Amino acid sequence: MADFLLELQSEEIPARMQARARGDLARLFAEEIGRAGLAAEAIETFATPRRLALIARGLPLETAAVSEELKGPRVGAPDQAIDGFLRKTGLGREALVERDGVWFAHVETPGRATAQVLAEAVPAIVRAFPWPKAMRWGTDSLSTESLRWVRPLHGVIALLDGAVVPFEVAGVAAGDSTVGHRFHSSGVIRIASAATYADQLRAAHVIVDADERATIIAKGAAALAAGAGLSLVEDAGLLAENAGLTEWPVPLLGRFDPEFLSVPPEVIQLTARVNQKYFVCRDVAGTLANAFVCVANIEAADGGAQIVEGNRKVLAARLSDARFFYETDLKVRLEDQLPKLEKIVFHEKLGTVADKVDRVAKLARWLVEEGIVGAAAPANSLPPSVHPERSRGTQNAGPGASPHDARDGRGLADLAERAARLAKADLVTGMVGEFPELQGIMGGYYAAAQGEPAEVAEAIRDHYKPVGQSDDVPTAPVTVAVSLADKLDTLCSFFEIEEYPTGSKDPFALRRAAIAIINLLEHNGLKLHIGEAVRQGWLGHSPDRALTDAEIARRGTAISVTDYLWNFMIDRLKVQQKEAGVRHDLIDAVFALGGEDDLVRLLARVHALQAFVETEDGANLLAGYRRAANILKKEGVADSLWSAPAYATEPAETALIAALNTAEPLAERAVAAEDFAGAMAALASLRAPIDAFFDAVTVNDADPAKRQARLALLARMRDAVHHVADFSRIEK
Amino acid sequence: MILTLHAYWSARGCVILQPYDMEMGAGTFHPATTLRALGPEPWNAAFVQPSRRPTDGRYGENPNRLQHYYQYQVVLKPSPSDVQDLYLGSLAAIGVDATAHDIRFVEDDWESPTLGAWGLGWEVWCDGMEVSQFTYFQQMGGFDCKPVAAELTYGLERLAMYIQGKDNVYDLAFNDTGVTYGDVFLENERQMSTWNFEIADTDMLFDLFRKAAAECERCLEAKLPIPAYEQAIKASHVFNLLNARGVISVAERQAYIGRVRDLAKGSCAAWMDKHGWAA
């Protein structure tokens, strides 16, 4: 058994590509040697900015010899066939053996030296390596056929148990040499073997293990913050990136001018992270502190004082730029930014962002005026993350503010419309132009600063929420109205122009919009009839219009656009509820009843159904229902034409009729009152009678009148159940 | 600093050129980079190029953002295998001590939609400050670079701030007798920012753009790639001014960029034709 070390040494590999490159290297290596019949006991990979490496442990020294008997042509076959067989096996005619009138050849394929396999495998891996972006370089690049690598490749180490495996790839000969740290090490390092690789490089100020570098950074940065009485804001992505940018990481703590803290903390954190790859810190009160942690790649003689000073200056310039944007933006009222939205195309068939804003504002107002988004919930105030200085004036409403002390429906509708009209204005501010991630957040700050009511500022800030399943779902009524209106408009608009998600393609994030709508409705218990909302949110077209043949062909269904959208929502609901443990078949069982376009009510019914079918009563009723449904299906009974039997009914029959007489109106009333648990309880009362009926009564009676009456009774039972849920959709 | 870089790169075989006498966004637009990056012939050159970025104007209020600044540019074709070491040697020559400072090559792929060009490389960071762009050109004007050239672009003001230990570009000493960068350029930044963002006559600019584009095409018809390319440079700068004036909508933006790219590509194609080089 032998250990193999491979190192591909290059100019700086982008940090974001290193982890995937390690995975690709391990996979390709295993595949490539696997083709030759080799396997390693273990494969380890390493990456630093300047190298990608692999150690394969426990490789056999050669591939196994293969001994096999090949069946050839029949004895007496034409010479042509026999010669062909000999060529294939590489044997002479005298080596063939005859058995049962057929020629056989015994072929021995000797094992190949592993070094030989590797000498072919590595160049193949290098040439086929799937870098996200690769380049050509140097004199060889006169031809576009020259090797492509992520950055110029300078060296290859290939050592099998300490011996160089000789091969060449793109003019680079494999050997045992590499380089250490760019500035802490000089000259060539000759690696002895896989076993000494990591330690020899460590001596040359290179830590080859990315996880070890990440740990050094995480611990070092946390300790520096703690030493300054602060706590580090952890950021796993930033940690991995810094580990990918350094071979010898040295975290350093610096301070910036506290005057910059007048810029919103989100901006400071983003600038530090995105532009400079710095960590930020909080003080004991949880407020952003004027400190940063940068990660150097060098142990400077002065302990990093000059490095920290240099980084401080750069951050100061960045923050100065951010403050420039912030202060410039603050000079323009959000409503004065709105004309610029008329120039931004939202979608070529859907007009500009200004058009969208207008639709959303009307829809948000409608949601409040219809009482869908309630006035009952208390108006939330801005959470403490908004700097008090900038919320100043919030209580003394500025010129644009509504009389918001009276939180009646009308006041709320005004606030919702106002928030919706200003919600997208920050898209054309300098800060959001620089940092698109801050959309909404900046609008919230600017709204508060210009004296908008707190609810409006908060709604502008949070109206993109919820983004994804784990995001906070807004609860403040104004925010909910704007968020819901925005997403309903998006969904309706794109459905109107037939831009539906297909397969993995969802360029307008409509699935996410649908999930967000579901979360908003469910979390806030909002009673929204989707059909009405769609009618309201439509672009002035009729959502129930007849579809053209072409549309029907594209969709594969002839249902109206509204129903199509509702089906889409239900599909998203199934996906979304799966995590909460709600069964999709039960959603189908309720949905199949039709006529329901209130998502919260539908869900309440599903929850009640799920609770019921998981009880013993529920399970047994389901069994009884199935038995009845099977009989009815076999007999081809579609409708219940039940009437009181003219013959003397058997006791169990009488009991079932009585039970239905009681349960039917109970269930009906409960459904009407949206008491779904009550409806289920009414159904539960049928369980014992139906069981008893099947035990004691013969449906298939010799008397056709009795048979007909009993089938009709079963159909009546089925219909009673269907009034609550379509049990035929339940899968288990 | 410029003299040191000239001496350093001259000693390594570069021809030392003077700035191109036209407004352009970066040294990359200099024909000594753009056109010379095409074709098989070796080419090594170094020069200073004043660069104009109208949208980067900050009315003289930002310590290191300027709408007019100087780039030092080196083009090495084909890219030497020790080009990173050569570059680090040039930093040492102008006084950057790589053992006391944190020098890093951070991924920054370069793409110029207006030149139809792209390359892979890095921003070079010195203590977190981007002091250079380092690019291996892969395509120029839509043509594969055969062979690939390395382009090194130094931000002269930033390097000077770093070497002189100044926080603000306007505090840089321009000579030994107390003249600062601010004395020379602050008023220029104020006035030009105002003009770029607020005053520039957009009708005139639209007109200039059209005329430059038309002239470029006339030159291409006359098989004169260099004057054609000059008009492409002009159109590109006018587009940047229009952009700073905020009169180009998002939808139009792509169309304008595409127009400039077509002009630049046409010029590059004519240059290739002139030399009889195959794509």
Image: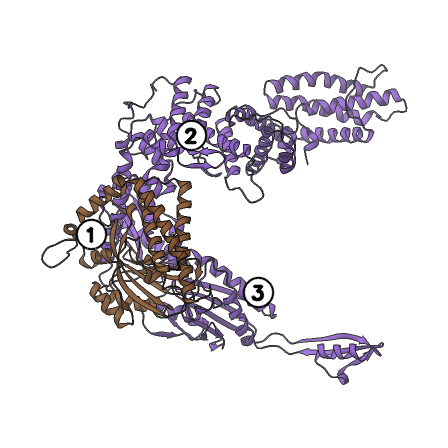
Chain colours: A purple, B brown
Res A76 seen here: yes
Q: Secondary structure at mark 1?
A: helix
Could you give the CA–CA distance between mark 2 and mark 1, rounded to whole angstroms? 42 Å
Residue A497 against residue A680 in the figure, above or below: below
Residue named by callout 2: A357
For marks 2 and 3, the one nearer the N-term is 3
* Farthest bottom residue in view: A94
For label 2, count other residues whose C-alpha is less than 10 Å away and answer few (under 14), some (14-19) or many (20+). many
The label shown at residue A580 is none
Q: Are marks 3 and 1 on the same chain?
A: no
Mark 2, mark 3: which one is toward the viewer?
Answer: 2
> Which quadrant holds the N terminus of chain B?
bottom left
* Farthest front residue in view: B222
- Amino acid type, mark 1: Val
The label shown at residue A31 is 3
- Amino acid type, mark 3: Glu
* Residue A643 figure quarter: top right
Residue sitting nearer the eye, B266 or B153: B266
Residue named by callout 1: B169
Do labels 2 and 3 touch, CB within 8 Å? Answer: no
